[in-house]
Image (spheres, rainbow, N blue to C red):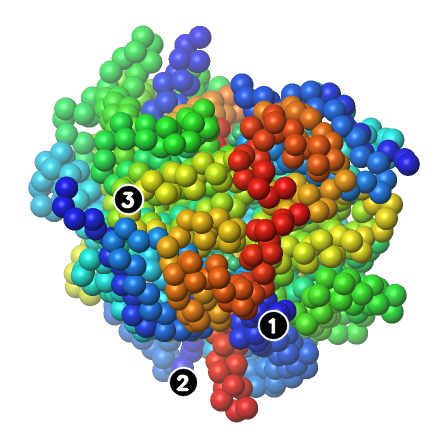
Amino acid sequence: MSALKGHLEAKGLTAGYGQTRIIEGISLSAPAGSRIALLGRNGVGKTTTLASLVGQTRRHAGTLTLDGVDLTELSASRRAELGLGYVPQTRDIFRSLSVEENLVTGLKGRPRAALEEAYAMFPRLKERRRNGGGALSGGEQQMLSVARALLGQPSVLLLDEPLEGLAPVICDQLMQVLTTLKMTIILVEQQVDRALDFAEQVIFLERGRVMHQGAVADVRNDHALTERFLGVDLVEQTGTGA
Amino acid sequence: GVIKVGVVGPFSGQFAQGGENFKQAIEVYQAIHGKTVKGDTVEFIYKDLPQVNPAQSRALSQELIVKDKVSFLAGYFLTPNALAVAPLIDEANIPAVIFNAATSIITEKSPRYVRTSFTLWQVTAPLADYVAKQGVKSVVTAVTDYGPGIDAEAAFKTVYEKAGGKIVDTIRMPLSTNDFAPFMQRIKDSKAEALYAFLPVPITTTFVKAFQDNGLKETGIKFYGPGDLTQEPDLPSMGDTALGLLTAFHYSQANPSALNQQFLAKHRELFGSSDKVTFFSVGAYDGVHTIYKMIEAAGGKDGLKAVNAIKGLSWESPRGPVTIDPVTRHVTQNVYLRVTEKKDGKLQNTQFETLTNQPDWGYPGVMK
Amino acid sequence: MTELLRVSGLVKNFGGLTVSSNVNMSLKAGERCALIGPNGAGKTTFVNLVTGVLKPSAGTIYLDGQDVTKLPPQARVQRGLIRSFQIARLFPTLTVREHVHLALLQRGQKTFRLFGSLRPDAATKAEIEDLLAVMGLSSVAETPISALAYGLQRLLEIALALALKPKVLILDEPAAGVPHSESHRILDALDRLPADLAVLMIDHDMDLVFRFAHRIIVLAQGQILCSGSAAEISADPKVRDVYLGSRARERA
Amino acid sequence: MRGDLMRLPAFLENHRARWGSVLGEPAVLPLMIGAGILGYFLFPEDLGLLTRILTMALYILSLDLVLGYAGIATLGHAALFGAGAYAAGIMAVHIVQDPLLLLLIGTLAGGLVALITGALILHAHGLTLLMLTIAVAQLLQSLANKWRELTGGSDGLSGIDPSPVLGLFRFDLYGRTSYLFALVVLIVAYAIARRIVRSPFGLACRGVKEDPLRIAALGGNPRRYLVVMYTVGGAFAGLAGALTTVTTGIVGLDSLGFTLSAEAVVMLVLGGTGRLYGAIIGTVAFMTIHHILAATDPFHWMLFIGLFLIGIVLFAPGGITAVSEKLAQRLARRGT
Amino acid sequence: METILGIAVDGVAYGTILFIISVGLSVMLGLMRVVNLAHGAFAMMAGYLASYGMQSLGLPYGLALLAAILLTVIVTLPLERLLYRRIYGGNNELQQVLLTIGLTFVIIAIANYSFGPTVKRIPLPDLLSGSVSLGSKTIPLHRAFVIGLGAATILGLWLLLERTNFGVRLRAAVDNPAMAEALGIRTERLYTAVFALSTGLAALGGVLGAELLPLDPYYAIRYIVLFLAVVAVGGAGSILGSVVAALALGILDTAGRYLVPNFGEFFFSAALILILFRWPNGFFHRRAA
Ligand SMILES: Nc1ncnc2c1ncn2[C@@H]1O[C@H](COP(=O)(O)OP(=O)(O)OP(=O)(O)O)[C@@H](O)[C@H]1O
Ligand SMILES: Nc1ncnc2c1ncn2[C@@H]1O[C@H](COP(=O)(O)OP(=O)(O)OP(=O)(O)O)[C@@H](O)[C@H]1O
Ligand SMILES: CC(C)C[C@H](N)C(=O)O
Ligand SMILES: [Mg+2]
Ligand SMILES: [Mg+2]
């Protein structure tokens, strides 16, 4: 195998829906194999940022490259072919397809045998393989969405609140799995402590702009940061709990 | 001055053939007989009414009367559209000359209706009589389930049973029928000696084909009908399946009369071809003739006087000798028995017998 | 205290799959109860059965002592059994105020007034404003849902449930999509509920659940595994195995 | 803190869009009356056509109640129109000739047919509902075709001669009475329809249209709202049918036909759904264009009408009213 | 007994034609959520092309059939790009009605202008123009041929949509286009392919069915309700549903006409209402929703 791929580089991304701009001049650099947590309050534009990387928003300015290849003008499907994997916040299961068929859509030309990887990761899905995607429980849909993205063996994985709706045990498992992956990962997550455990770099968003970027260690030591951007005192929370 | 005639007909839509026939026949008439009557120019204004829509028929006719100031209304392809104007023409005292709509009741509804087409009673009654005289003992009728179809069925049944024949089944087929196979099966099962059928275009083609495809022709059951079934423009698409059909009708392109030849020749001269000429054409052609005569008599004023002036009027039409019956205001004419055959590689309706001076047998009191 | 909701012998099969097998539970007036359990345990299905969206394969549901098993959802709502949706489910073109107003009209059975006015009377108006204020929605009262932030939609969901004056309130993942740091808003709102109301909450956010519930019921594979106080549940090794996982220890 | 949760720009944007459509509303009624009277004096020779436009507008308005405000997809609306038309026609031939009574009869007939069929079919959605509405209309049409003694079958029901309106105004050849009568009926009906869509019931119907399940969760029975709104729409459609009968004096099978149902949808979408005045504007636009095209080229008007409809979808997707509202907003924004 | 056989055979033959034309409509509705009211117009277009090819250019039947299908697809593909693409999806129904009715009008006008209003014919080759006897029942050879082709179509379509990755990707793209794109599925190409498939089937049915559904410009509107009925009864997007629905409606219609000819239309509408009442989502509703 050649050197690790998945160096994603965004410069001055400005994007939104229709005429409205939601994110303004977002720049981020994710070296191959890096793990970045993208944090911020409700509605600051985290989802929009990921969607813009994937190519689902309307771009007003900025550029995007992956391993030097310019993605800026490429369609979402081309970006996916070149290595972007996406787990959207809304999961976006194909409701009219069975669980197995949902997984097939993520194969990107790989043989069907590869589905076993997904089933190994989430045995629950194997039990439900013939079920309609729309009939899955909330958490099962989340597993399916993650598994579907991983089957395509992306070099960059974009995860939008993948833990939402998952039972704590499953959260543990999933985070476990994510740590073993050899790819660039950008994670948006409301469970800040888990996100910080996982990531190397943290980016804070506010009103569609990057307000702070730094190593996890710095964030952990700087209560003012989390207080300001998330409204929590992290130390206190993780320290005592409920 | 100018005397205006409003023509309401189907110039688009599925009956557009009829509208085109109207218009071309009018132009042919004017080309042969001139555009002026006693110094007045006769001008035609066309209004499109593609389907059954009596309310629209009335609105268009009203517009013609009120806005365009026509002295005559004409055209009217479909019965309900013709019926819709009765109160209007009475109030405005304007004659309406019907070029086609073929249900008997129409002319009863107003003294200002004049009709130059035919009725299903008119062509079916003599046919039923003929069929009975041929020694056919039992007949099954199959008609489309709407006004003219029901007229056709009633006419055939009345006359044929009076002549001693037996109707074994009367089938009414929905206007929307696509697949005639079940009807064919039923006709077959009725074991009748002959079939009498009436349908409007365009499903005539399918019906005639289904008759052959389902093996009825081979069983030897005879097939009679009014001439609607074998209209000349449809014959090519029916192909050889139409061969040997026996129909009764008032007009065929193949009518050998000199006047008809002149009529067709003028058609070819003006429009390049006379292949599409049908009974709609002569309906309009003779309709214009009555309008010209009414103008001669009343000058485009007083509709009732104009109509009265042509009661009993006789003339020679491309279809043969015709008379406006003074009571029914409907055209009395010859009905021809025809058989569909191939001549010079082209299908045609060859007339082989003439039943003269047939009135509208469906008008109350005409049939004794 | 009176028993407001009782479920006995509840069974639901989807084809060959049994999602609820013989569930028995009850809720008393004033109770604050939580239902937790692994993904696919049948929690949402349970809510759907109780509210009448799904028909049970067997079992009976009593509301305030009456058998409501055969009643359609809206009849149960009219008797005070109200739910909020796991994914906010609102009318995209209606404003926040219109939502609350509609809920009040619905509660008062005034929605078949074909020629009535939409201008609320004084009492209704006061109630609308009050509900909006309680949920912190006054400033967005005229915003249509299509332009409303998701977190606020969740709050409106709860406002609607309250507007219907529930006896039993079921909240399916009320905090989903709301950051942990802001889930206190929901708790605040719930704190202001009338004391005699029975509340059943489903959520995977254990901070919220433990802070809210007096009693926790754990559902696994369609069956009740155990129930008890927050402390009991978090100490239970079975629950830890199937649900809470390792972190629970650090956090609880 | 709460400031973060509020998304001000989006809020303002949508807010304006909503008011754009509501603010224009109060002016509609006076405008309609004005335009109606103006039409009477400007086109004294076209009152026949104008009357048809008015009766059609009423019919399309009834469809807007059903489709635009309750989201009931129908391609069989003519069933309700035809029920009113035939009821009024049959009564006029045999029993009463008073135009107002005939309108009442038509209204009741339309409402009754809607109530009965609506209760039967409104559990269905989408294409199935569409097909059911078509089938109901076809069933009624073949019934009318079969029952010749009563309906005149395919020849149409003629011999309808309504007495003068209020015993004073005869229906004349020029269509003056018809026109003014139709205008008054339309305006009154419009006012009533507007009252209904702005009632608590109207609000609930909007809710049902957007999410019936959510209405159930609020304690409402979505199907009941649908049936009631369908009945209301049916009554309006029946009124339109009766008005057509009274002003034209004839009823044909076409008044129950698929063409009439489909054309109604086309006109409504053309104008814009869910606005009431969209129905009026759509009708006027479609019928005027149709009339002009059919008059100038009776042979090929279909081509142009077809191109026009395609053009609307491409360049004015929400219908005529949506586009003009957007334009008005843009102008207003420039103004402030 | 004979009667029953007769009704069954005629019903199946009629149903097969309904199937071939309607299944394209169903696939498009199920997959792209487009109620394509111009579907009948496309079938008609192919019929006219085939008729022209045989009558005026003297092509043999088979060649005319193929050419007509191909040409229809080629002519309609730009429409997909320019028009249909804007109206895909379940919340555009009203736009769809407007657009596709408009398109139908245009096609009718063009057909009327170029070929006139009379019925056009697609002459059958000698090979297909005879009849075969099935006991006491005579069926036209052409119908037997149609039934055979219908069966092949069913099999082919089913394999394509349910048993290939293409089918899965297609259904995914329809379900949620944005997500499908994000998974690397080129949705636009898929839509184009389905559109071509749908018009191709319409074209095939239009040519094969010309014996039953006569070709005149109004073909485009006259039969669309019938095709929609098949789709509704079958369940949108379901191949098997279309088969069963088309056969059921074909047999029902045939039986109604044979047994109660005077009330045939009545019988059919009433039966349709009952069926839809009983199966409001069609016989074969697609999985979950
Ligand atoms: N499809 C859309 N159309 C218009 N505006 C949108 C759309 N989706 C999101 N927005 C707006 O964009 C802004 C940013 O939303 P986004 O979903 O990116 O935030 P987020 O940080 O992911 O929030 P959350 O924590 O709630 O997921 C919000 O104001 C939202 O209302
Ligand atoms: N309509 C259905 N048909 C078949 N299976 C279904 C249906 N609805 C739900 N299920 C299955 O029933 C099980 C229970 O689902 P349910 O939604 O009740 O879980 P849950 O406890 O709410 O899970 P989560 O915490 O993930 O939301 C799941 O495995 C799901 O796949
Ligand atoms: C023979 C047919 C063309 C007659 C026409 N359908 C009518 O209504 O009278
Ligand atoms: Mg987000
Ligand atoms: Mg759940």
Quadrant where the N terminus of chain C sits is: top right
Of all residues, the one furthest to the bottom in this rendering is: D335
**What is the three-letter code of the residue carrying label 3?**
Lys
Q: Secondary structure at mark 3?
A: loop
Residue marked by disc 3: A182
Residue behind label 3 places its C-beta within 8 angstroms of ligand 4 = no
**What is the three-letter code of the residue carrying label 1?**
Gly
**Mark 2 surroundings: few (<14), some (14-19) or many (≥20) residues within 10 A:** few
Q: Is residue A240 above or below residue E284?
A: below
Q: Position of residue D64 (x, y in %)?
A: 60, 60
**Residue closer to the observer: A106 or D277:** A106
Residue marked by disc 1: D3
At horizontal 86% and vertical 48% (from top left) the residue drawn is: C195
Q: Is residue A107 left or right of residue E225?
A: left
Query: On the same chain: label 3 and label 2?
Result: no
At horizontal 56% and vertical 28% (from top left) the residue drawn is: C241
Residue marked by disc 2: B1
At horizontal 52% and vertical 82% (from top left) the residue drawn is: D328
Task: Measure the alpha-carbon separation of dots 3 and 1.
Answer: 40 Å
Q: Position of residue B60 (x, y in %)?
A: 50, 68
Q: The disc numbered 3 marks a residue on which chain?
A: A
Quadrant where the C terminus of chain C sits is: top right
Q: Secondary structure at mark 1?
A: helix
Q: The disc numbered 1 marks a residue on which chain?
A: D
**Residue closer to the observer: B276 or D146:** D146
